[in-house]
Amino acid sequence: MKTFRTILATLVVLVLLVITSRAANLTEGWRQEPFKYEIQHPYDLKTSDRYDFDATNNTHHFWIYFSDKPHAPPPNKTTARTEMRLETYNTGEHMFDGDVNISPGTFACIAQVFDAQHGPVAMLIAHPDGVVTIQLHDEPKIHDVVKTNAISHWWNLKIAEDTKLDGKIKIYADNLLIGTYNSRGPRDYYFKCGVYSRENSGRSEVLYRDVKMWAK
């Protein structure tokens, strides 16, 4: 029994070392940057009605109901959201990095690469069955699976984007490359995370912790 436990403990340590190594390799050559953000939420509510931040564990808590109002008053007709809108960038490569925990029943966009002038480029959609897929505005037939069994536990999400001509967007789940997609070349972009409700959803909720921004 002791031998089995020793082997099991060794395997756990090795797995952790591999995961740590992958994370370190992904950020090698990048520099972590301080960032500012604003919280978008239903315009008729206070921020605290749909968002809170726990500084003791660096965790952002977002929730929304499909019946909520948009983040801006009429004529805005978008569906309800509670999202972190990060700073705009327009040169170099940038990467969003954060641990995410999706609550049961969530049907919402949980992260975006956003073109400031022309809307979303890439959206990550959390489905109630626990699958997270990518939706591309310019390639609507693509619905690649980013993560399965994604509900009620922490996993790491990284989204890298290169602003140059022919630049790419790369999606990583738990530090494994899931897919590489076309971006739109030089222009203003920003990342978003949180919950942007999908049609026929109810309550959607997500936690993000240790959010970081990287650049090179």
Image (tube, grey):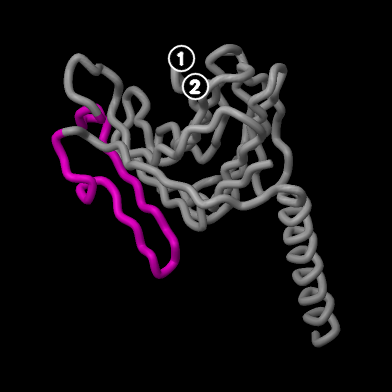
Q: Is residue 96 left or right of residue 197?
A: right
- Between residues 97 and 199, which one lies in front from this camera angle? 97
User: Label 1 sits on what residue type?
Assistant: His
Chain part drawn in magenta = 44-71
Q: Is residue 86 left or right of residue 76?
A: right
Q: Do the residues under discs 2 and 1 have CB atoms within 8 angstroms?
A: yes
- How far apart are labels 2 and 1 at the CA level? 5 Å
Reading the image, the residue beneath label 2 is 115
Give above or below for 109 relative to 60: above
The residue at the point 48 percent across, 33 percent down is 88
The residue at the point 55 percent across, 35 percent down is 132
Q: Percent position (x, y) of residue 166?
A: 72, 17
- The image quarter containing residue 136 is top right
Label 1 neighbourhood size at 10 Å, few (<14), some (14-19), many (20+)?
Answer: few
Reading the image, the residue beneath label 1 is 118
Q: Percent position (x, y) of residue 11?
A: 81, 69
Callout 2: SS: strand
